[in-house]
Image (spheres, rainbow, N blue to C red):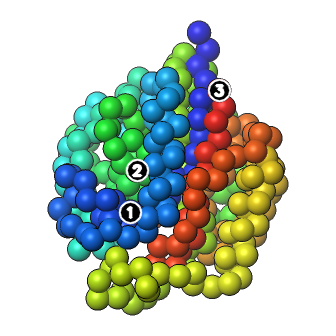
Amino acid sequence: MTGKIVLGALAPHPPHLVYAENPPQNEPKAEGGWETLRWGYDKLRASLAKLDYDVIIVLSPHWRTYVGTHVLAHPHFKGLSVDPVFPHLFRYNYDLKVDVALAEALNAEAQKTGYPMKLMKNPDYRIDYGTIVSCHLANPKWDKPIVAISSHSSSAYFSPDVMQEEMLALAKITRAAIEKSGKKVVLLASNSLSHRHFTKEPPLPEDMSHEHIYNHSQYLWDMKLIELFKAGKSKEVFQLMPDFTEQAIGETDSGALSWLLATMNFPTKPAEVHAYGTVIGTGNAIVEWSLT
Ligand SMILES: [Fe+2]
């Protein structure tokens, strides 16, 4: 049977959302906060609960690799992930399983085309919080294996146009590996949209009287992308990505959203926008493309 993508989602990773939820894995405890976004994730969780799928593939902006793209390829990782910027909000005990066969298939496809890729087989490797937060918020039971892909910082080190070309190539590789695997796959792009953020934190981080949009121009950029998602114009989103990334200081500089849209082959079906909200002023949208 040919493998396929059954659902793709833009699944941003503000650690605040895990903090606000108080799962047993996270040490700091909150009084709540950022409910609109968390209710959006509830809707994504409900969609996934109804879905028959084998594995989640996630691309995270916070696993930055400067020499090519890396992929987790050890069956089990367990440890403590501490957000370097928000250690008071996110100290998360993770325990996750990796679909090593699919990770190796991805690498095999990459080697065929000369795309620089490496497998991370160190069992003590500390998993980045972008991967953990997006996977937790989408599937808090952690009952599916994941394949985690790093972000090669081509946007920062070269340009957003180079990033776009790389993500088109990575998307082809990802699609080929999925098809050959015979598996039903969920894709997650772990990134915010506009990403300029506050430099001072209120005394109580979850005090929502302090949370608001940081910058009107960046808000307008976020709304432009959301309008295109809802209209099924994912190709246009891809074409706008270099401008968006530079002008909205987008976390799309990781390539995650470009990879997601290209791997799904630019769906023309309207996406479902489950939520939009800010976290320390950054723009976050939870968006689902159901492909079944
Ligand atoms: Fe981030």
Of the image marks 3 and 1, the number of the one nearer the N terminus: 1
* Separation of residues labelled 3 and 1 (CA atoms): 28 Å
Callout 2, which amino acid?
Leu
Residue at which label 1 appears: 17
Image quarter in which the N terminus is found: top right
Q: Which mark is residue 137?
A: 2
Which element type, helix, strand or loop, lies under badge 2? helix
Q: Are marks 3 and 2 in contact (CB under 8 Å)?
A: no
Is any atom of residue 238 visible in this view?
A: no
Residue at which label 3 appears: 292
Image x and y of residue 271, in percent = 70, 46
What residue occupies the far top of the structure in this picture?
A: 1
Callout 3, which amino acid?
Thr
Image x and y of residue 123, in percent = 22, 40
Say few, some or many: other residues with alpha carbon within 10 Å of mark 3 (under 14 / 14 to 19 / 20 or more). Answer: few
Residue 255 is left or right of residue 146, and the answer is: right
Of the image marks 2 and 1, the number of the one nearer the N terminus: 1
